[in-house]
Image (cartoon, rainbow, N blue to C red):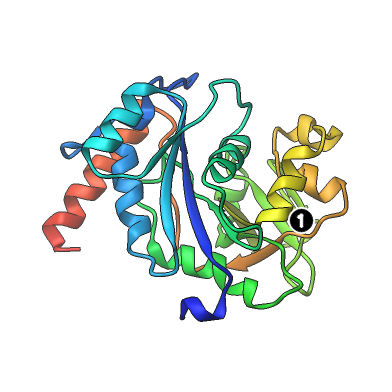
Amino acid sequence: MSLNNLPPCYAFIPARYGSTRFPGKALADILGKPMFFHVYKQAKKCPLFQNIILATDHELIAQKAQELNVPVVMTANTHKSGTDRILEAAQKLNIDSKSIVVNIQGDEPLLHPAMLEELLTPFKNPEVNITTLARNITLEEAKNPNVVKVVIDKNNNALYFSRSLIPYPREENKLYLGHIGLYAYRFAYLKIFTSLKQSFLEKVEGLEQLRLLENGYKIFVHLTQHSSFGVDTPEDLQKVITLMKTNQEKGE
């Protein structure tokens, strides 16, 4: 895919220092480099971005980013979500209002670059304003409330996201979609999103994206073959380190 097919695309990696389950997670060491650097390195493999920027609230993270030549923007430490953080960073950089902004979670060091291209491809359709990803998962995976599920309409627009098992299998059902928390927005829609008040379903499920659906906005869901593994705990970190060592040994 060529950049000529799309508006300017910018990726932002929100990286706050505070984390309830894993303080300082963005700086966690993985094979000699902080976690955020591995996310940045994977994102750099996607050729569609004008720039990839770390958005942080902490001087230690910013200092380490500068040492590793990772573009970084300091943001407020009062943001309630990564979405708010990337909006501030994008506004500070004065990016073009027609740009596409991608929110890449800072705890995804195994991010596959192809997933970013899949996230951006739908924007060739001018009617698409917000995108995310999902993949087929098993019934056992779907039963896990920590795995967010999504159901879509015939046009691949999200109908609902839930921690519950959806759709509910009155009879045998083998088709479940697990949501992958990558998002891309036309810049105007990122601004709209952050201006909306927290919604009822968002609070009930603890899922920020439901705010958009409750207010009538469409989220296009691209189905991917790639999986994702986020680091939420020190135990997750050890799993990632083991996987990355294995990949290194395979030459991947």
Query: Which residue occupies the foreground of this view, 197 or 226?
Result: 197
**Residue 74 vertical placement versus 13 (above, below):** above
**Residue 184 vertical placement versus 85 (above, below):** below
**What residue sits 63% from the left and 36% below the top?**
84
Q: Position of residue 242 (x, y in %)?
A: 22, 43
**What residue sits 63% from the left and 59% below the top?**
177
Label 1 residue SS? loop
Q: Is residue 194 left or right of residue 20?
A: right
Q: Amino acid at mark 1?
A: Pro
Q: Kindly identify which residue carries mark 1.
A: 167
**Residue 18 vertical placement versus 45 (above, below):** above
Q: Position of residue 89 (x, y in %)?
A: 53, 40
Query: Which residue occupies the foreground of this view, 90 or 26?
Result: 90
Q: Which class describes the residues within 10 Å of circle 1: few (<14), some (14-19), or many (20+)? A: some
The picture quadrant where one finds residue 111 is: bottom left
**What residue sits 77% from the left and 44% below the top?**
210
On-image quarter of the C terminus: bottom left
Q: Is residue 21 left or right of residue 64?
A: right
Q: Position of residue 196 (x, y in %)?
A: 81, 38
Q: Position of residue 83 (x, y in %)?
A: 61, 40
Return the residue found at the far front. 94
Labels in figure, total:
1
**What residue sits 47% from the left and 63% below the top?**
116
Q: Is residue 199 left or right of residue 15?
A: right
The picture quadrant where one finds residue 62 is: top left
Query: Which residue occupies the foreground of this view, 8 or 246?
Result: 8
